[in-house]
Image (spheres, coloured by chain):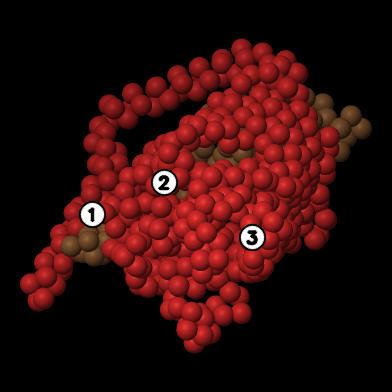
Amino acid sequence: MKERRVINGILLTALLTVVLLSAPSTTLAADAPKIQVALIINPKLAVKDMTKKDLKDMFLGKKTQWADKDKTPVVFVMLKGGDVHKQFLKDFVGKTEAQFKTYWKKQVFTGKAKMPKDFKTEKEMMAYIAKTKGAIGYADIKTIADQTTVKKLTVKK
Amino acid sequence: MRNRQTMRNRQAMLMTVILLAICGVCMNTSAVAQSNLTDVDQQQAAQISALRSELEDLKSQSMGYDDDSDSGFGTIDIHGFVSQGFMQSDRNNYLTLNTEKGSFQYNDLGLNFSTALSDKLRLGTQFYSRDLGTLGNNQIEVDWAFADYRWKDSLGLRFGKIKSSQGLYNETRDYDMLRTFALLPQAIYNEINRGTEIAIHGLGLYGDTALGRAGGLSYQAQFGQRSIPNDGGYALFLENALGNLDDIQFDEDYAYASSLIWDTPLDGLRLGISRGSQSFDVNYSNRNAMFGGFIPAGTAMLSTIDDMVVHVLSAEYTHNNLILAAEYITSRGDVTTGTTTTTLSQTMLDSDGAYLSASYRLNDRCEVGTYFSSAHSDPSDRDGSDYEAAGTGPSWTRYQRDLAVCTRVDLTENWILKIEGHKMRGTRDLMAMHNPSGANPDWLLFIVKTSLSF
């Protein structure tokens, strides 16, 4: 009797796995046009470019100061979700949205950091970056095409 | 026999049909909703979208952020979680639970408060409670509480009760919502030892440093003392080895833990090494005569564990939605046992274990994973054959192998459900006191667990 219940339970696990394997992924669709993501910073920052590694370290909380003469503290901000956010994470951080959230929840639940500040829209994010010392974020390159309130940052490989 | 097989097959087919129906309904719901919009509805939707965009523009312009405002310094962040699980085995009682009957004594919850006083200084604490069979019993304890001063990226200081860095997942082992599996590989993350392994009271140094094209290094080093509860996991292992004991009192000496993680130049690959050590004494009295009657019942006894050293080698590779991980642990220490005046035995504890795991996120709602884990009482006799040949006991008492399969469903952003199955071979980690009729070498374990977090 017990063995039947345990076997049924394990069978349920296997069946659920097989069924869910057939469910489509809702991450970035392979056939969707690729979004070009640009990095944007506060215009007062005396920084023109940075390496992809340094950028990744900033958004993982490992690099906390800019390499300017004031060693300005890094204030990185995110979008709450969406395709621009997913493309940014894929191109610059090397994590999926779920992995990135898990990484930051680990920092929070071990007392090492707080959740990064996030915004619903690129416009809200850009307004914050424009007025916050040390701020860095990202947006669709088309969104910032005519913007003068934030500075575009070149990312070197 | 044939009727039982037929019933099993019908149950399996019925479950498959039900699950397929549920998934079909979920996938079709959004498509049906979209196709029902009429032309008028679409015009109205476009107007609402335009108005919303104008409103967002006005909101952005009026936000009026100052350069240094909205820093959040001094505000208190509160987060928490609660998990409840059920374990059932077909044979053998496991992890102090009565799993042969099925047990809900498998839950934990935590609540943490933290604040940043400046961009360099943080304070925080977490209260934690768990129930794992006879361990914990939902007593509330301080899980971690420390001040954290980050002088620069390569050097920070923590002091207080600090989560211990050991392997990839020791610091986060309590957080069910942060991993695929309900039960971490027990070869490395034994739940019975959790109460001692989880934290160090003392000082910690940490930092991150970039290595240019060689990637980056993250390190932690902690020194202080570990807390060993007198009614916790170590006490259980002691009683399991020596028989019924009274008045168990642990006296902790120093402990340290350190880890080095290398983010390699290969995207997604990180390698790590951890080393930790601790020493402690334990005083107790024996309820029954020991050493062939040489030591009468009620004698005051002392065991000294000197410099128990644990090493963990770790590797984790992440590629898109796939995460592969592998870890290997060794644990060695000298144990001296005797009365308070006479040494009776000196032995060396020497064990090792390893696992290999894979997890894959199928979509925003579902993740699946599997691992194979193996723990051994003697690295030189991992299959126990020498032990059995010497007539000491069955070989399968000297190891425990575990093949696990898990499905994790994210019901909402904050609520998850896991269903997990384990096929076990070996009884190394079972407690004789919880299996008085003896243990069986081949057994199955089924776990269902749900967690909420915020």
Residue B418 is left or right of residue B116, and the answer is: left
Residue B171 is left or right of residue B361, and the answer is: right
B298 is higher (above) or lower (below) than B399: above
Which mark is first along the chain, 3 or 2?
Answer: 2
Q: CA distance from mark 2 to mark 3?
A: 28 Å
Residue B386, percent from left and from top: 53, 84
Residue B233, percent from left and from top: 52, 50
* Residue with the mark numbered 3: B338
Q: CA distance from mark 1 to mark 2?
A: 36 Å
Query: Is residue B34 visible to us here?
Result: yes
Quarter-wise, where is residue A88 in the image? top right
Instruction: Say few, some or many: other residues with alpha carbon within 10 Å of mark 1 (under 14 / 14 to 19 / 20 or more).
Output: some
- Establish whether labels 2 and 3 are both on one chain: yes
Quarter-wise, where is residue B148 in the image? top right
Residue A71, percent from left and from top: 86, 32
Instruction: Say few, some or many: other residues with alpha carbon within 10 Å of mark 2 (under 14 / 14 to 19 / 20 or more).
Output: some
Which chain, by letter, is red?
A: B
Which mark is first along the chain, 2 or 1?
Answer: 1
Subunit under mark 3: B
* Residue with the mark numbered 2: B134
Q: Are marks 2 and 3 in contact (CB under 8 Å)?
A: no
Disc number for residue B432: none
Residue plotted at (52% across, 63% down) = B290
Residue plotted at (43% across, 78% down) = B394
The residue sitting at the right extreme is A69
Q: Amino acid at mark 2?
A: Thr
The front one of B380 and B144 is: B380
Element marked by disc 1: helix
Residue plotted at (42% across, 72% down) = B426
Q: Colour in which chain A is shown?
A: brown
Q: Amino acid at mark 3?
A: Gly
- Establish whether labels 1 and 3 are both on one chain: yes
